[in-house]
Every structure is written in structure tokens, then in C-alpha cells.
Image (tube, rainbow, N blue to C red):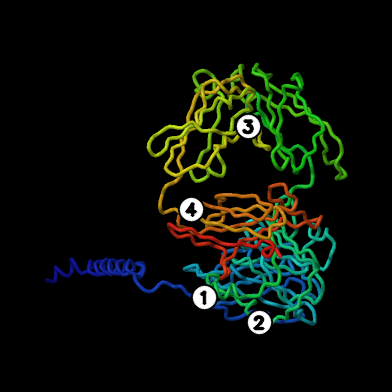
Amino acid sequence: MKKFFKKYFPLIPIGLIVINIAMFSHSCANTTTPPTGGPKDTIPPVLRKVSPEMGTTNVGRHKAKLQFTFNEYVVVKDPNSIFLSPPLEKKPKYKIQGKSVVVFFENDLDSARTYVLDLTNAIGDNNEGNMFPGYSLVFSTGERIDSMMMTGTVVDCNTLKPIKGATVMLYKDHADSALFLHRPDAAVKTDEWGYFAVRNIQDTLYRLYAIVDENSNNIYDPDNDKVAFVDSLVKPVMMVNDSLPELQKYDMKDTLACQARKSEHELAIFREKPSKQMIVNKERVGERTAYITFMAPQAQIDSIWIRGVKQSKLITQFNLQKDSLEIWVNDPRTQPDTLYLNVNYLKTDTTGVLAPAHEVVKLAKPRKTSPGGKPAKKDQKKEDTLCVFKVDAQPERIEQYGFEIEFKYPIVENGFDSLTFRFLNPKQQEVIGKYKVTQDSLNLRRYTVWPEGKLLVGYEYFLKFPHRKFKDINGFWNDSTEVKVTLPNDDKLSTLIMNMSGVSNKYIVDLLNEKRDKVLRTYIIDKDQTLTFPYLKAAKYSIRITEDVNRNGMVDTGKLLEHIQPEKVKFYKLEDGQTLIDIPEMSEIEQSLNIAELFE
């Protein structure tokens, strides 16, 4: 026994250490296992302390710091949402200290000025990302706090949808140039409803603007930013009271509360057309096809020609805005590798004035074409040797829009009188029908074939294009094709009828889907009439009416310096104020709209 202890006793401490390490390791492994179960944290951070306190005056201008202490650890989710009004040259900076966010400024604050620092959409908790609803800290570098406020809404000029994150700006400088030259005297960001309440401002007259500030410098850049403005000077009439609904931080899903807030001004935001005029882009897209684009609309061209090409062989066409010009050479012969396009037009000079200018635009042949202008034989497709066109004949649109035909290239010979329009009645009896053809006034490659007589449900309609009846500028002839269309006969489809009265101007009436991102059907009217929107699936729709003041058939944007607002857009509203019309299956819904009252 003595020999046993003498031999093995020294090993006992080592064994105990090994056993202890194994047990300790197992214990440590358990401590790293995350706990399971338990409710998910859905509570946003709570603000416990603010320094300086709300309403503090005589805050130091140099190296000012604001500290916000929460009940838990937080992170700054969006630094751009830490917004100071009036804004400084450089954006506010921040750092995290424990459970606090410290905001500081690289620029000195102005003297005797009321400031508002807003934290809406900026801060969330460190774990689940629950967002702090927001807080606006008001302080002053002077003896007093400004006490007035102003509210409003910013919407898109075409859809009237709210614009989130627009910068609303107030200027005591009433000059038109102020928006371009310096930062505002007060500013605020819009929420998800496009709503704003600019608080603690002076009791004076302002210019009111809103911009979508792409580079976040709080100065309007017409090349990048969208803008909105109020025509006249504005003056605040409401006094700040933190109990007002307009100053509360709401959950944006609380529709009733958000819509109940008073909105004094509505600003329709738009993108200005550039004012400087010059050629900004050019491309030769084919052997005989090219285009040039201008910076601004309504380009004024005096003359245009291509070196070595007879003037009679040149075909040109502007788009509706007259900021893009398509060019074709009506000559099937192989064209030079580079075409030299000469353009005499009015160009903005160094003084900002339109003046006559001459430019030579080099149009190089696309690389993928062979010397003869056609693709290599191994890559050649059938359409490369044909007069190509497409026919749009949608069942839901055929009655209003006819057979819409668009050629890829201008045609030099047409055979519209050789088309065959026929239809089969439900008894499969064939009848040859009559038709007429019109050419689009804005697109010389587009034509419409209009069947004569009323189209009927249950009939099959055919439009046939015979072989070699149309020839394009490449010298290619068309292949034969036939298009078939039948009116929708789904019994579940519905019809919306709009009785339009009080029409004293020209208006564009659009039927939109529920999201307002797709135009389903359009009418242009200038007198009282009934509009029919047939073949509608069960869904929600909107009716948008645009006042076409200059009667050009398009929606025109605004011009800031000329104080021209974008053309007015309104949506038809039901009696309950809703702008969505709920169309059920198998129904015919009739509504009446007095446009004069709508646009009062």
C-alpha cells in the first residue's frame, strides 16, 4: 500500500486538474449557448435625458454639443435624419457614448438664432433595430425662442402621391436667386405622408419652397433636384404648442391621426426642364439611322444637312418635347463609316443668351455592321433583310385605338390600299370590311388602321398585310402577316362610365391602376361628353384629370424663375373623399364629374 501511494500519489493533483479543466470547459461551453425562447423586443428606445434642456437660451455658438441619453444602447440608423434647422454648411456630426448620442457641429452657430434639431427616423435600439419615434430639441443662441410654426404637404405633381424626405425651406430673402445661392432660414424634412411642420420660426414673411435634395447640401441644384414652390409670400399664423397634433411624433401607420393634422400649404413637386440649350448626346444606331438630343426642350433648328447627302434624301423628326431629333438617310446605298451632320440652331452662349450657332456632329457607323451596312451573314437574321413593323391590337383597346402599326424605319412606298380587313361572325360567315388609315402627326413611322362600323363581341377580326407592299429607306420590302383580334367576352369584366361636365378647357383624362403607376386608357377632351372605360377586371382604379392649359396634348412641368407651376392635376373623388373607385365583377358603374368645380 505504501508503495502504491508512493508511486501514484504525485499523479493525483494532475488528475484533479485535468478533471477540473474538463468540467470548467463544459461549463464555459454552456455559458456561450444563447438563451432560447422569450418574447422579442419590440419596444423602441425611450429618451431619458436631454442636454441642454428643451427651450434653453444663450447656448454657446462655438463647438456646441447636444446630448440625448436613452434607457438602452442605441445606434444611429440614418445620419442624414439628424437634421438641424436652419442648416449649417456642414451636416451635424455624432458619436455614441454609452447609452447617449452626442451631436456636435463643425461650424459655429449663428448668434441670436433659434435652432431645432430633429431626430426623426435617425435612431434605433442596438439589438432589434426598433426605431426611436423622434424628438425635436429647440434651443437658442440668443435671449429668446421664436414661437411661430407653419404646416403643409408635399406631393408629386403628376400622381399627387406624398413625397417622403423632401426638404421644405423658408427664406426671408424674397429674391428668386436665394434658393440657388444660400441655405434657408428654416427647414424641415417631410414624413411618409409628405407632411411637414416647420416649428419655432420668426413671425415674418417668407418664400416657401420644397426640394428633393439629391446631394443633401440644402441648396437647390436644378440639374439634379426636384422643386416645388408657393406662388406668393407666406406668413405663419400658428403658434407653437407641443400639445398640438401637428407637432406630435406619430406612428406613420396611424392613418386617422396622420390625416387629421392640419395642412396649410400644398406644394406640387416637379423636375424643371433645363434652361441651357446645347447638343448633349448623339448616336448612329444603324447604317442610315441616327439621333441627337438637346439639353432643353423646344430646340430651334434653322437648318440641318449631312455632308455628301442630298437634302432631299434626309428625313428628320422631332419628339413631342422637341429635345430629341431622329435622322434617317433615305438612300439604300452603303453609307460612309462617318457621317458629318451639320446643325444650325440657337445655342446658349457664355452669357446665358440663345444665339445662332453651327456645329458639326460626327456620327460613326456602329461597329457590329459589315462594310455593306448589314450584319455578317453568319449573324444575319430574317428581319435584317425585311421592312420590319409591329402591329399592336389589344382586345381591350381596339375600339378606341384601332390597329396601331409602327415601322422600324420610315417607309418610302406604302400599300395601305392593299390591306384586307375581314371578320367572321359567330356562325363563321366571312365578311370583308372597310377601313381607313391615318398617320401619326408626331411619329412619321406610326399609322393607325381604323375599322369602319362598330366592333361586336363574338366576332373574329383579321387584318392582313400582303407580301411586298411596303418598302423602307433600306430598300427592303415587307413580308406578309395577318393579325387577329376579338373583343373580350369574359362575363366577369365591368365598365366604368364617366359623365364629364363643366369642360371649358382642354383636359387629359387618364384611367390609372390602384398604384397609379400605369395608365390603362386616356381620353383628351375639350367639351362636355361621356367617357366609357370598358373591359375592367375587378379592382380599384383612379381617374386623373390634367388641365392642359396650353392645349399641346401633354403634361407640362413648371418653371421656377418664371413662376410657372406644373399643369394642375386632380383626381376624381367619391362622396366619402376617396380617390380609388372600387369596381366589382360584372358591373356597370356610372359616375358624374363637374370639372369646373373640381378645378376651382
Q: Is residue 273 above or below residue 156?
A: above
Mark 2: give few (<14), some (14-19) or many (20+) Cα within 10 Å.
few
The answer to which image quadrant residue 27 occupies is: bottom left
Q: How far apart in space, not on screen, are marks 2 and 1 (Cα)?
A: 25 Å
Q: Which residue is mark 2?
A: 242
What's the amino acid at mark 2? Asp
Q: Which residue is mark 3?
A: 445
The answer to which image quadrant residue 201 occupies is: bottom right
Which x, y percent locates residue 141?
Answer: 77, 77
Q: Earlier in the sequence, mark 3 or mark 2?
A: 2
Q: Which residue is mark 1?
A: 72
Q: Secondary structure at mark 2?
A: loop
Q: Secondary structure at mark 4?
A: strand
What's the amino acid at mark 4? Leu
Q: Nearer the viewer, mark 4 or mark 2?
A: 4
Which x, y percent locates residue 156?
Answer: 65, 59
Viewer-nearest residue: 576 or 11: 576
